């Protein structure tokens, strides 16, 4: 069997990776002297590892490569990666559950998150609340927005009781 | 299957007259069809080196066939309609030996197997004789297993690890029962000493308080013992489910050939729940009520033995009625269970085939079909309830007659002044508590059979033969080189109907073998044998020179990779699916495997990357994506032997190319068996083996086989014609 494409190298050497940016414009990536503009940054494990396994894609969304650990980059590049990740991944963290009720076939959660208070509405518990790791719960509302409980044990007693009644 | 001693006396005498000795009978088999086609006994007897077919006519034994085993080249079963025929090939011509109805199928299949062994080149010694014996013994034992006592003993095994908790629960429950004895006694004191004329008011308040204390104590104890016993019940049920699940995973694939998946699901969910019921509802209640019956009975006799004797009169009636009903209802519960299992199986089927149903717009018909099954469940349940709901009020009436007797006899004693009114009232108090449990214990007749049926079915699964992963004396082979050899392999799912015949093939490490043939030619069967999902009927499969039946199963399976036609993804994340065969893989290894499989890029582009949850059957991913995840799984697994079942359907060119690339990398350096459909794979294979009706007909490279202009050539031509038709139409 013949291989048309050579195998892409698995991981980039963080010493040869640099990211720079000007405000409000996607960053510029330099790998081994080659420059890519308007780079997209994605996590390979967005739910289970937020600062590791970061993949870069060029302006046409073609894969460039991946670094294992962000902290191996220089400080400026690290900052850029962190900014980019914050830009791409928006998941408010629930810090408190005030009320939980259902009306007809919808369930509602009145919550406070690290990004402000809101009411989460969704239909059907099974498809919308998932414990992705012990103590870690992700809630998806009807629009597909995501909310997260980082660690159920860090919630107050009442919130914990409320959420434990459904998951 | 019969032994000499099982044959009728007269027949044995008849045989002794023949030129064989009685003791020389190897085995015999009884058919229920006489040679003239009427129902009657015909015997196949294999004695020494002869095969006899004998039947009774007019009180005498007549020999229909008497053949030397050496003259017989093969023995087969020819399936007819309503019966089957046992055929032997003698001097190149088929000979009809006898016929048997389907009732004899199993015995005669076994007989054919044994006969093949006797007439084949490797005439085995008489070593199989004891194995027939044990088989029979096992069957008898299996019949005895339905006895509830066995089931109860098995249930008890579940509590052994938790016995100390059980003792605590027991003690508290008994304390509760003792406390129940108090209120009626207090009532007696209240009526006789406090409410008598002239009344003694000073005692009223303390007595009412004592009554209240008894009630409160009772409530507290019920809560505590209830929580305790049900927690234990949940625990036992969990243990039972775990045992069941462990066994289900380890069952031989054969089990799933004969049992519908839905039916198995019903077992796990419904039947394991019945174990839960047993421990939560049945066992604690049964215990408590029994204690009450004993306690109350004792108190009643102590208070007034003549009255107490009257109380006992209805009890034999109750017991007899219950026992009769139980055995009667058990049939209906068995029926109900079957209907439920069928219903579950149908629903599971309908849901997994939902796409097909929708495409053919057959929703209504499916619904109607399911409704019909549902109706059967309704009917079965209705029969049960109609009976139990009739029986219970009648039992209640019998119980009530006891009360009537007490009013009559006890009333007389109060009138005579031989008994106080308080004693009579206390008596009634205890009586209510006595008949209550008695009635409860009788109502058990209602649901104990159902529960026991379900529980024994659960044990039936738990007790079934699991795959032996590590038989004693198995050869550990943790590092295979991948040399595979098939030696005269013959196999049939039923012994007399071979699917593969005398297949011989030696494969060098790293070689790629393409398996070619029409569907049903035996390609998948060959793969299943290599994975040891089934054992060969005859011949051997060797890996690195060792018979795979002698290898540790774990070593064999862990070094075989399987990329299946319809890639199966488990519910879980993409990462978990890739790491399925190597759960301790690091993320770097995972990513590298995905890169080799051309899967990394599309995975990282998913919203949740490797953390993406793939639903049942991986519905959220495209076929090509699922394929590549499965390839990554195989790469990470790093098997020495790879099995590749190519999908028949083609994907778009770009995806196809990526998959081809990934497969090429995967196959490098591994012994590969590819069930190939794509011409490119066939061309690249080192050798191709062409199967036709279970027999290897051609072996060679793509070019060699094309030149030969045989079966393979025609297959490729056909494939080309089809492709060109599609191309023209497209």
Image (spheres, coloured by chain):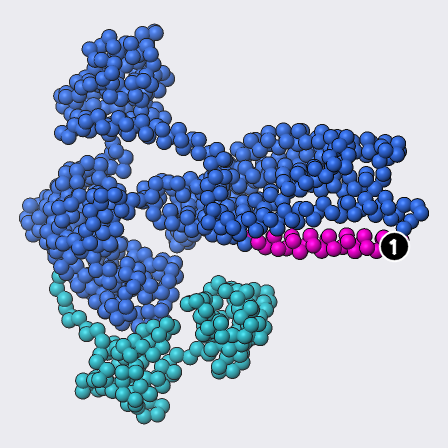
Chain colours: A cyan, B blue
Q: Quadrant of the C terminus of chain B?
A: bottom left
Q: What main secondary structure does the magenta stretch of the protein show?
A: helix
Q: For the point 85% across and 53% down, which residue is it?
A: B204
Between B31 and B235, the one lying in front of the other is B235
Q: For the point 27% across and 85% down, which residue is it?
A: A73
Identify the secondary structure beneath mark 1. Answer: helix
The question of residue B128 being in magenta is answered with no
Q: For the point 59% across and 29% down, which residue is it?
A: B324
Q: Quadrant of the N terminus of chain B?
A: top left
Q: Is residue B687 left or right of residue A157?
A: left
Q: Is residue A110 left or right of residue B158?
A: right
Between B353 and B10, the one lying in front of the other is B10
Give the letter of the chain under mark 1: B
Residue B349 appears anywhere in the view: no
Q: Is residue A91 left or right of residue B313?
A: left
**Residue B293 x/y as whole percent:** 67, 39
The residue carrying mark 1 is B202
B474 to B641, vertically: above or below: above
The question of residue B218 being in magenta is answered with yes
B415 to A146, vertically: above or below: above
Residue A94 appears anywhere in the view: yes
Q: Which range of residues does the magenta coloring cover?
A: B201-230
**Residue B468 x/y as whole percent:** 29, 44
Residue B648 location, quadrant: bottom left
**Residue B42 x/y as whole percent:** 31, 17
Q: Is residue B545 left or right of residue B523?
A: left
Mark 1 crowdedness (10 Å alpha carbons): few <14, some 14-19, many ≥20: few
Q: For the point 31% across and 86% down, which residue is it?
A: A78
Residue A18 location, quadrant: bottom left
Q: Residue furthest right?
A: B198
């Amino acid at each position: 069997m013949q291989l048309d494409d050579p195998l892409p190298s698995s991981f980039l050497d963080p010493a040869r990776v640099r990211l720079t940016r000007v405000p409000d414009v996607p960053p510029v990536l330099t790998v081994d002297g080659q420059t890519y503009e308007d780079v997209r940054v994605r996590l390979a494990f967005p739910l289970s590892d937020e600062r590791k396994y970061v993949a870069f894609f060029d302006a046409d969304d073609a894969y460039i490569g991946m670094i294992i650990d962000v902290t191996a980059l220089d400080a400026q590049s690290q900052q850029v990666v962190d900014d980019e990740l914050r830009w791409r991944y928006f998941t408010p963290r629930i810090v408190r559950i005030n009320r939980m009720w259902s009306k007809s076939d919808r369930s509602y959660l009145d919550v406070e998150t690290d990004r402000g208070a809101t009411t989460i509405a969704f239909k059907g518990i099974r498809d919308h609340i998932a414990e992705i790791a012990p103590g870690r719960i992700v809630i998806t509302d009807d629009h597909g927005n995501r909310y997260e409980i980082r660690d159920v044990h860090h919630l107050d007693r009442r919130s914990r009781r409320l959420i434990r009644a459904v998951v | 299957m019969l032994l000499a001693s099982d044959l009728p006396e007269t027949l044995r005498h008849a045989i002794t007259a023949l030129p064989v000795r009685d003791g020389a009978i190897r085995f015999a088999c009884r058919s229920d069809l006489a040679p003239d086609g009427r129902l009657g006994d015909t015997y196949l007897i294999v004695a020494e080196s002869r095969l006899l077919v004998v039947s009774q006519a007019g009180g005498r034994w007549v020999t229909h066939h008497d053949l030397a085993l050496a003259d017989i080249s093969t023995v087969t079963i020819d399936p007819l309609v309503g019966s089957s025929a046992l055929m032997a090939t003698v001097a190149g011509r088929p000979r009809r030996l006898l016929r048997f109805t389907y009732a004899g199928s199993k015995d005669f299949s076994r007989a054919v197997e044994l006969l093949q062994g006797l007439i084949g080149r490797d005439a085995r010694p008489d070593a199989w004789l004891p194995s027939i014996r044990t088989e029979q013994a096992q069957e008898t034992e299996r019949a005895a297993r339905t006895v509830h006592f066995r089931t109860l003993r098995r249930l008890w095994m579940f509590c052994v690890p938790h016995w100390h908790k059980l003792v605590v629960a027991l003690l508290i429950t008994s304390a509760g029962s003792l406390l129940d004895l108090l209120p009626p006694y207090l009532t007696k004191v209240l009526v006789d000493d406090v409410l008598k004329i002239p009344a003694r008011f000073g005692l009223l308040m303390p007595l009412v308080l004592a009554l209240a204390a008894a009630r409160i104590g009772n409530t507290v104890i019920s809560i505590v013992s209830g929580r305790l016993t049900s927690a234990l019940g949940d625990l036992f049920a969990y243990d039972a489910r775990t045992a069941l699940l462990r066994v289900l995973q380890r069952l031989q694939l054969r089990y799933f050939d004969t049992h519908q998946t839905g039916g198995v699901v019903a077992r796990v969910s419904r039947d394991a729940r019945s174990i839960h019921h047993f421990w939560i509802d049945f066992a604690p209640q049964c215990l408590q009520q029994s204690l009450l019956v004993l306690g109350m009975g004792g108190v009643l006799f102590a208070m007034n033995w003549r009255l107490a004797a009257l109380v006992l009169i209805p009890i034999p009636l109750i017991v007899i009625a219950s026992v009769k009903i139980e055995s009667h209802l058990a049939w209906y519960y068995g029926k109900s269970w079957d209907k439920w299992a069928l219903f579950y199986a149908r629903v599971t089927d309908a849901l997994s085939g939902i796409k097909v149903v929708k495409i053919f717009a057959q929703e209504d018909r499916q619904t109607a079909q399911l409704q019909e099954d549902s109706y059967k469940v309704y009917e079965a349940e209705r029969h049960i309830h109609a009976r139990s709901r009739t029986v219970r009020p009648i039992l209640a009436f019998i119980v009530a007659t006891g009360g009537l007797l007490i009013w009559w006899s006890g009333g007389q004693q109060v009138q005579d002044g031989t008994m106080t009114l308080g004693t009579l009232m206390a008596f009634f108090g205890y009586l209510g508590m006595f008949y209550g449990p008695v009635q409860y214990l009788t109502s058990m007749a209602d649901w104990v059979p159902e529960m026991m049926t379900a529980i024994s079915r659960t044990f039936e699964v738990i007790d079934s033969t699991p795959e032996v992963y590590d038989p004693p004396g198995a050869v550990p082979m943790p590092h295979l080189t991948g040399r595979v050899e098939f030696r005269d392999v013959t196999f049939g799912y039923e012994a007399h109907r071979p699917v593969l015949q005398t297949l011989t093939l030696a494969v060098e490490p790293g070689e790629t073998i393409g398996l070619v043939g029409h569907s049903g030619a035996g390609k998948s069967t060959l793969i299943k044998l290599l994975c040891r999902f089934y054992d060969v009927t005859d011949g051997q499969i060797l890996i690195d020179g060792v018979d795979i039946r002698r290898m540790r199963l774990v070593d064999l399976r862990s070094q075989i990779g399987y990329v299946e036609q319809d890639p199966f993804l488990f519910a879980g994340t993409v990462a978990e699916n890739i790491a399925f065969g190597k759960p301790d893989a690091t993320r770097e290894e995972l990513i590298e495997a995905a890169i080799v499989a051309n899967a990394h890029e599309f995975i990282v582009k998913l919203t949740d990357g490797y953390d993406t949850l793939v639903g049942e059957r991986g519905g959220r991913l495209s076929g090509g994506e699922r394929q590549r995840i499965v390839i990554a799984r195989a790469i990470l697994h790093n098997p020495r032997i790879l099995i590749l079942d190519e999908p028949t359907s083609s994907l778009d060119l770009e995806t196809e190319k990526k998959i081809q690339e990934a497969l090429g990398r995967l196959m490098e350096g591994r012994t590969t068996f590819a069930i190939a459909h794509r011409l490119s794979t066939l061309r690249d294979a080192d050798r191709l083996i062409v199967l036709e009706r279970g027999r290897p007909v051609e072996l060679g490279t793509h070019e060699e086989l094309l030149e030969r202009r045989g079966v393979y050539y025609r297959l490729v031509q056909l494939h080309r014609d089809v492709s060109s038709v599609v191309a023209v139409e497209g």
